[in-house]
Amino acid sequence: MKTLSLVVPVYQTRDYLCRCLDSVLVPEVLDELELIVVNDGSRDGSDEIIRRYQRRYPGTLVSIDKENGGHGSTINAGLALASGRYFRVLDSDDWFDTPAFIRMMLRLKDRREDLIVTPYTREYTETGASLCYDYPQWQEGRSYRADALSLSPDGSYVCMASATFRTALLRACRLHLTENSYYVDMQYLLFPIPFLESFCLIRESVYRYAIGRASQSVSRKSMLNRLSQHERILCSLIEYYASFCASLDPSRRRYMTAVIAQMYYTHLSLVRSADAGRMRAVLGFRKLERRAHERAPELYQKVGAFAYLRVSRRLHYLNLLFFRRLFRLLSVLGSHLIRLRGPA
Amino acid sequence: MKTILVIAWFYPPLCSSEGIVTYKLLQNSRYRYEVFTQKQTDSWTFGHGMALPSREGIHCIYAESRTPEAWAEEAFRYFCQNRDRFDIVMTRSMPPQSHAVGLRIKRAFPSVRWIASFGDPLSDNPYELLNGSSLSPYALSHPQNRDRRGDAAFLFSPSRLLHDLLWRLRHREGVRHFRSLRKLEKQTLVLADRLVFNNSSQQHLMLAKRPAGKNAHIIPHSYDPSLYPDLREHKTDGKIRFVFLGQLNETRTALPLLRAIRRLRDDVSDLETRAEFHFFGQMPDRDLAYIMRKELQSIVRYSPPVPYLDSLREAQRADWLIHIDAELSRVCRENPFFPGKVADYLGAGRPILAVGTANGALRDCLHRAGHLTLSFSANEIKEALYLILYADLHPEVNEELLRSFTAKAVAARFDEKVVQTLDEA
């Protein structure tokens, strides 16, 4: 059995694919790596690149060619095929730091935990800036029980770029991500949590998360365009949390609510700034709130700590529909006035 | 066959990128040319004395003037005196006075066909915008504010309006110069019979808001295989040699690459026995200081500029060639530059590692040709260097695409456009 099954979902990323594949297909790891490249119906020539690499690495690279079904569908397909002890996802427009990956692979062989966390680095490719996200709350190499799971001091949670799950754990939780939708990484990260028993941190910043493409799912513009998908995934997380919260220990409950709350606030901010279809977005948000209130009151209460949301609830969300620009203008004028008055 | 008058401030033996580009085009074209140029001053060049072979049919006329304005006046006089010998006039955009002469000729003699060839954009030059000397960074029309134009708070911000006003007062001269360039560019785009751009991104940028465009053509920069030496040297040290040729400055800096080298050295123990980075040209103090401070001297070497033909030899001797772009993402979404040096790199037949190449024609071309195009991320560059040095990464170069950049092929495309221009006459 190979140590790691690495799934690379590919959709129209011809320009970045070689960078991604080259960074993992190095002789030091070939014997221990199963690379599953899932072409999600790309029509930009990515399939040709995949075939070329498959010819070069027949014992390591497995490819799946499928109809377009979104990020979740590629992970579902990859997981169905995965035979490695551990499972990880690498988006095809990102890459791994090869020396760090080699070191991580060496150490992964001896690990038995359900989740291996590694720091990751965000690469702002337009400016060249990079920002490393670490998890200083955990000691390197130490095995933790699942109840030690927590957010890092800066509020970061274990994200797609930092998580390596035991394949058996993902199968045990019957992980199946929503298809034809963005933001399924939140499902990928939270669905296994109730089943998690142990985890450990390997302090190797392996994942290089490239930021800067306008079409990226995390760019504000594309998030606004896909507001309904964001809502759908958030709903699924609330439902999932509601069905498991009774059986979870307090720390895992805290962790899950904190992560869902972050997505909740992002959603509120998107609803607030939506121009097209704002009425529908606000109505959807009201529905979402009602559902959270009924199904997961603890979560509903926790997200209510945010003053703006509390005010919105009091005003029956009318502030999200009207006076938006007025509020913004007032706040801008206010900030200018403060600046003109100078320091107190 | 009548002769084409080329009005170009830069032309060999003056050593400048602009002159070399013009030289390669004319040298491989099948028409007769008179090049009205100058060798009184070598400002903005790397000096005199670039000995390049010249074919029959190209005759240079050297002006007496030392300033572009006086040179332009002389060029116009020369054309008027020899009006009957020329059906076509071609002007190059550096310096802009060359197009000003073309404009003057076109207005005085409307039947003369005018080809306006652009090296870089005149008015919306991203470098100028970045340096903040031509357009107020607080102006709504500045590209860095493109996403905030619909924002009422930004639009009516008293702070922005005040800053804008103060900036305009402080940069009166620059603003006036910018306006005159914009006017010249607009008139050139409207009146010239043929517009020649060197890449599609430049064309998009310059014709985006302009009425012209019907006669626009892309004639890319080229390489001339006959200028490269027949190299039979064998390396003995076993190191992979990365070579950068050209000018670096505070805007176009090698720092991301140097940072990547430093990080790689910290990651692996034997970098200095495996790789050598050699920079030829000018390097800003900040980059040199970084090399000293991080003790990279055993890996990174720096040499002053070398003559053009020597630079081609150095390019051929390299294992990898490095191209570095400026960080222009704040002021343009598509990089409109395609340096002539990159065409010479393509001709050297070595793989290219291009750093910071933003979206645009250059990136597309290098990518299609099989070369490595990287962002400014030091980690991404480090990763590429690691794979080159330790995993034997070697791009598969697209030979067919390379052939389309030979000076003969490019000049043939240019000649076609000349024929069309003559047919219209």
Image (spheres, rainbow, N blue to C red):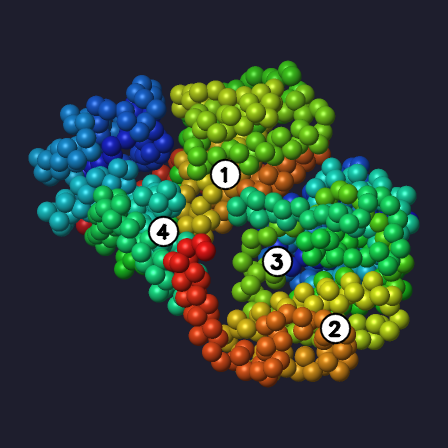
Q: Residue furthest front?
A: A344
Picture quadrant where residue B23 is located: top left
Chain for numbered disc 2: A
Q: Is the C-beta separation of discs 1 and 4 under 8 Å?
A: no
Comes first in the chain, label 1 or label 4:
4
Give the crowd class for mark 3: few <14, some 14-19, many >=20 residues within 10 Å.
some
Same chain check for tags 2 and 3:
yes
Residue at the spot x=45%, y=28% of the render? Answer: B284
- According to the image, label 4 marks what residue? B137
Give the crowd class for mark 2: few <14, some 14-19, many >=20 residues within 10 Å.
many
Give the crowd class for mark 4: few <14, some 14-19, many >=20 residues within 10 Å.
many
Residue type, numbered disc 4: Pro
Residue type, numbered disc 3: Gln
Q: Nearer the viewer, mark 4 or mark 3?
A: 4
Question: B279 and A15: which one is in front?
Answer: B279
**Mark linked to residue B305:** none
Q: Is residue B415 visible?
A: yes
Q: Nearer the viewer, mark 1 or mark 4?
A: 4
Residue B99 percent location from the top left of the image: 22, 43
Residue type, numbered disc 2: Leu
Mark 1, secondary structure of its residue: helix
- According to the image, label 3 marks what residue? A12
Chain for numbered disc 3: A
- According to the image, label 2 marks what residue? A299
Left or right of A305, for residue A338: left
Q: Is the C-beta separation of discs 1 and 3 under 8 Å?
A: no
Q: Is residue A34 visible?
A: no
Residue B279 percent location from the top left of the image: 50, 25
Residue type, numbered disc 1: Leu
Alpha-carbon distance for marks 2 and 3?
Answer: 37 Å
Q: Residue furthest left?
A: B81
